[in-house]
Amino acid sequence: MFKDFLASITHNVISLIGTALAVASLVLMACLFAMEQFGFEGGPYIGILTYLILPMLFVIGLLLIPIGALLYRRKLRRLHGDEAMAAMPVFDLNKPATQRWTLIFLGATMLNIVILASATYKGVHYMESTEFCGMACHTVMQPEHTAHQRSPHSRVACAGCHIGPGADWFVKSKLDGAWQLVAVTFDLYPRPVPTPLHELRPARDTCEQCHWPTKHIGDKLRVIKHYKEDEANTELTTALVMKVGGVEGTGGTGIHWHVSPDFEIRYRSDETREEIYEVEMTRADGSVVTYADRKAPEDGGMWRTMDCVDCHNRPSHIYAPAHVEVDRVINEGRVDRSLPFVKREGVRIVDAEYESHEAAREGIREELYAYYNENYPEIASEKANAIAEAAEALGDIYSVNVFPQMNVWWDTYPNHIGHEQSDGCARCHNRRMRTADREQISDDCDTCHLVLAEEEENPDLVTMLQSE
Ligand code: HEC
Ligand code: HEC
Ligand code: HEC
Ligand code: HEC
Ligand code: HEC
């Protein structure tokens, strides 16, 4: 009977192809896996091959073997007439040969299960890796991946915030992921990728796996450097004491009061969450206060419970405005502050549309040289190196904030911390948001921070800090 079986799988093309496919993918899988163990880095595509495509081919190969055998049997039956052969192989465990073959078959099956289980395990892990999420769909995720790499969360995997623990979200993410692969393959995805993410998992299950929401952070000093758009690129200092606060004793204080467990804040807004219509605050004792903007639409929009992401909407994908980025590279010394008007010109030059990162680097360099050649010919020749370095730094900031292929420009993804890049906190903290008794959500400057210095040249405070 097993001779029969062997004949049926070796005499038919389908089973032979199946066997070849299974063996070939197994050997390739083993080689790639071994290469990876020896430290060979092949990039995301090798990972997709090793952990997704090859295991799939292996399974298809294994399935083809019995399918081919059954088809072959049916063909033989048709040729020899019904009586000549039973529909299914006769299986007689009393024969020693059958026993031996059964053991071999069981052994091979176990081995296959082990191989597939490890491949599935590795595959699942691989699909959760930053490498897969960020680079497999390279162009689509390039902005988010690039920003993630330079954020405080660069060591947190994409899945840490976008999937979180638990089986239900795992399955959901795989279903979404399958759709995303289709969207990428057929170029169906929107550019830029829209935000906010309406199906983002609540922060309770993601951020709060690592951050303790009731941690009392207290006051934080923030010193911010800006440079004036004058010939000397004058340095200006802003110093704020941020009242981050947190839970203290029995209640919350300061900015993190919003996430203290004693309160729940819900709000109704448009789809983009940039315009907030109504805010509802529920205290621990169940009493509710409602603030509303009288000019806002009375219904429509969507309700949402406030969590970390309503303020920290850019914990990982941080894009700064052009003038802030130029300030940063001046402050880091990569752009020489002694180049006249370099702040003003830098912002003008990077705040333009170029077709690609390469085109941007070239265009920025040409524009900067042209400006100095025309207006400061001596400086252009004396400080040619500084100009080249500045051009390089400006090209860098363009390449990490602007992604022309994805239509991501300087202002595509505003940050909600503060009130500079977008209304941010002022979406709720404004004069229009009032209760029926006309009480408003506070917008006094010292609700959230003490302003120690605002755009000052050499404030005492800085001298004091530097003398330490
Ligand atoms: C620290 C948490 C965190 C990590 C890590 C993280 N993200 Fe995000 N991601 C967010 C948040 C929060 C948003 C925006 C939420 C909102 O406004 O709705 C977001 C938004 C996005 C968006 C929508 C477009 C946008 O920029 O708003 C994409 C795409 C995305 N993330 C991909 C990734 C990829 C790929 C990785 C890994 C390379 C990653 N994320 C890692 C928290 C994170
Ligand atoms: C896997 C753990 C992990 C998760 C999940 C996580 N974080 Fe963090 N987060 C960290 C660590 C670690 C740091 C400190 C990084 C450092 O200081 O180098 C940090 C830092 C921060 C900071 C301070 C950033 C700064 O500028 O110094 C903020 C704000 C923050 N996280 C918010 C969030 C939010 C919002 C989420 C959810 C969307 C989140 N985190 C999810 C681990 C995590
Ligand atoms: C009402 C808006 C708001 C909400 C909600 C909020 N934060 Fe913050 N958080 C801030 C602001 C503002 C700062 C100060 C940031 C700064 O000025 O750099 C801050 C600072 C932080 C820091 C940095 C503290 C440090 O030591 O530098 C962490 C970490 C953080 N938040 C985590 C969280 C987490 C986790 C949640 C959700 C449980 C959360 N925040 C909810 C506004 C908010
Ligand atoms: C609802 C809270 C809130 C209110 C009210 C508020 N601010 Fe702010 N402000 C912030 C936050 C949050 C930041 C961001 C700090 C950071 O960059 O991390 C900020 C940043 C700033 C900065 C620094 C901007 C920069 O990057 O150079 C200045 C200056 C400032 N605020 C001034 C004011 C003044 C003046 C008022 C009153 C008219 C005011 N703020 C009201 C929350 C608030
Ligand atoms: C969805 C609406 C909403 C947003 C967005 C929002 N807040 Fe608030 N905030 C409230 C409400 C409601 C109160 C309570 C009303 C009050 O005390 O005036 C409040 C109160 C506060 C308080 C006083 C807390 C206390 O001790 O009583 C601070 C500080 C504060 N917010 C800071 C911020 C900062 C900083 C941001 C932006 C990073 C921000 N808020 C964004 C709704 C919001």
Image (spheres, rainbow, N blue to C red):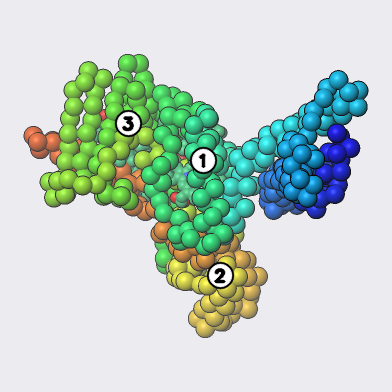
Q: Decide: marks 3, 1 in contact (CB < 8 A)? A: no
Q: Few, some or many C-alpha atoms within 10 Å of disc 3 (few <14, some 14-19, many ≥20)?
A: many
- Out of 90 and 164, give the one closest to the viewer: 90
Q: Few, some or many C-alpha atoms within 10 Å of disc 1 (few <14, some 14-19, many ≥20)?
A: some
**Any mark on residue 417, and which?**
none
Q: Splitting the image into 4 quarters, where does residue 83 fall?
A: top right
What residue type is disc 3 on? His
**Label whose residue precedes the other's in the sequence (1 or 2):** 1
Residue at the (53%, 35%) spot, across then down: 170
- Out of 223 and 323, give the one closest to the viewer: 323
Residue 277: tell me if it is visible.
yes
Q: Mark 3 highlights which residue? A: 258
Numbered disc in front, either 3 or 1: 1
Q: CA distance from mark 2 to mark 3?
A: 41 Å
Q: Secondary structure at mark 1?
A: helix
Residue at the (24%, 42%) spot, across then down: 268
**Any mark on residue 356, and which?**
2
Residue at the (56%, 53%) spot, across then down: 181
Q: Decide: marks 2, 3 in contact (CB < 8 A)? A: no
- Out of 119 and 224, give the one closest to the viewer: 119
Q: Is mark 3 within 8 Å of ligand 3?
A: yes
Residue 444: tell me if it is visible.
no
Q: What residue occupies the far right of the structure in this picture?
A: 96
What residue type is disc 2 on? Ser
**Label whose residue precedes the other's in the sequence (3 or 1):** 1
Numbered disc in front, either 2 or 3: 2
Residue at the (51%, 56%) spot, across then down: 183
* Image coordinates for residue 466, horizontal then vertical, percent: 52, 42
Q: Mark 1 highlights which residue? A: 173
* Image coordinates for residue 167, horizontal then vertical, percent: 53, 30
